[in-house]
Image: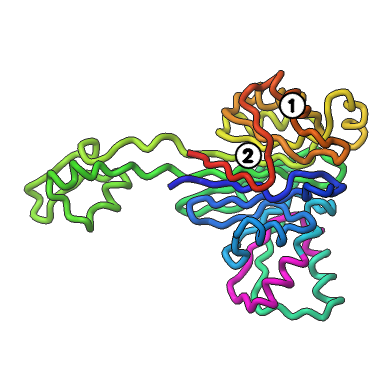
Amino acid sequence: MSIELTILGNSSATPTLNRFPSAQYLNMLDHHILIDCGEGTQMQLRKYKIKKSKLHYIFISHVHGDHILGLPGLIFSMNLNSRLEPLHIFGPASLFEILDMFLKHSDTRLRFDIVKHITDDSKREVIFENMLIKVTSFPLYHRIPTTGFIFEEQSRLRKLNIEACERYHIPFTFYNDIKRGKDFISADGKTEISNEKLTYDSGLPIRYAYCSDTIYDKRVINEVRDVDWLYHESTFLHEKLERAIETKHTTAKQAGMVAKEANVKNLLIGHFSSRYEDLNELLEEAKTEFPQTEIAEEGITFVFE
């Protein structure tokens, strides 16, 4: 099963006429995940035909407005649409203070539970895990507490060799165990077929790292080392390095440096300053350091396989 990432917003603090602030939708093994929720996110969900009712997990990197101002509206809309399923939200403690304030002063009583998961920007930690996926948070270095996230598959199931299974007359009820790596043993114990004859290797698990607002810092490189896909903020061109340092952001060149030094396979850049109308300038600069770079362009769905 493929993993799909749809970009909903790639702008930084100031929206433009054609770009929205940070937000991404990740469908990872049927886990429907929203990463950050800038202003207008629910409009983008509707535009790209993503049902907000599917969302069960929201991960917020930090509480600057361009990463959270869409969240109260999204929650209120879910409530108006009679949502009943719990919504798991991962973010700093201050996020839940803000949400509680909105709910209190708007006299809103939710029909569904918000399950609060408080992140810690001081250390790396696993914040969600089940049989299929694992999510790890790690520190970023911005003006306020900020975390990045790594979304990864657990060990992949092996791919069935259907032709071999049919040739050996393997009952369908054994397929799940075989995909988990077990040999086939008949009920009477007389027939045993090794797993290697019935499956193919499905490759290494996919890992996607999300680095929102941060200054260029060697510690981030160690956190995202060897991931398959890295999203990294690239707010400015390198000619604005002084401004990037002042605001604790990264340049496109520095994002490429992180990707190269971390030995990642692919880089997506986003969180662009509104001063840039032509995003290809930032793309070309990042590519001088890391050629396998793409723009996290709104409306584009990247398939991770």
Residue 91 among those drawn in magenta:
yes
Q: Is residue 261 left or right of residue 96?
A: left
The region drawn magenta spans: 72-97
Residue 141, position as x, y percentages in the image: 80, 38
- Asked if the residue under mark 2 is in contact with the one under mark 1, i.e. CB atoms within 8 Å, the reply is no
- Amino acid carrying label 1: it is Lys
Residue at point 57%, 28% (across, down):
265
Q: Residues within 10 Å of mark 2 (few under 14, many from 20)?
A: many
Q: Which numbered circle lies on residue 301?
A: none
Q: Quadrant of residue 75?
A: bottom right
The image's colouring method is rainbow
Residue 261, position as x, y percentages in the image: 66, 22
Q: Is residue 152 left or right of residue 189?
A: right
Q: Nearer the viewer, residue 244 or 94?
A: 244
Residue annotated with mark 2: 209
Q: Secondary structure at mark 1?
A: helix
Q: Residues within 10 Å of mark 1 (few under 14, many from 20)?
A: few
Residue at point 68%, 35% (across, down):
295
Residue annotated with mark 1: 218
Q: Quadrant of residue 242?
A: top right
Counting residues from the start of the chain, the first of labels 1 and 2 encountered is 2
Of badges 1 and 2, nearer the viewer stands 2
Q: Secondary structure at mark 2?
A: strand
Q: Nearer the viewer, residue 121 or 295?
A: 295
- Amino acid carrying label 2: it is Ala
Q: CA distance from mark 1 to mark 2?
A: 15 Å
Q: Quadrant of residue 157?
A: top left
Q: Is residue 42 left or right of residue 213?
A: left
Residue 57, position as x, y percentages in the image: 62, 59
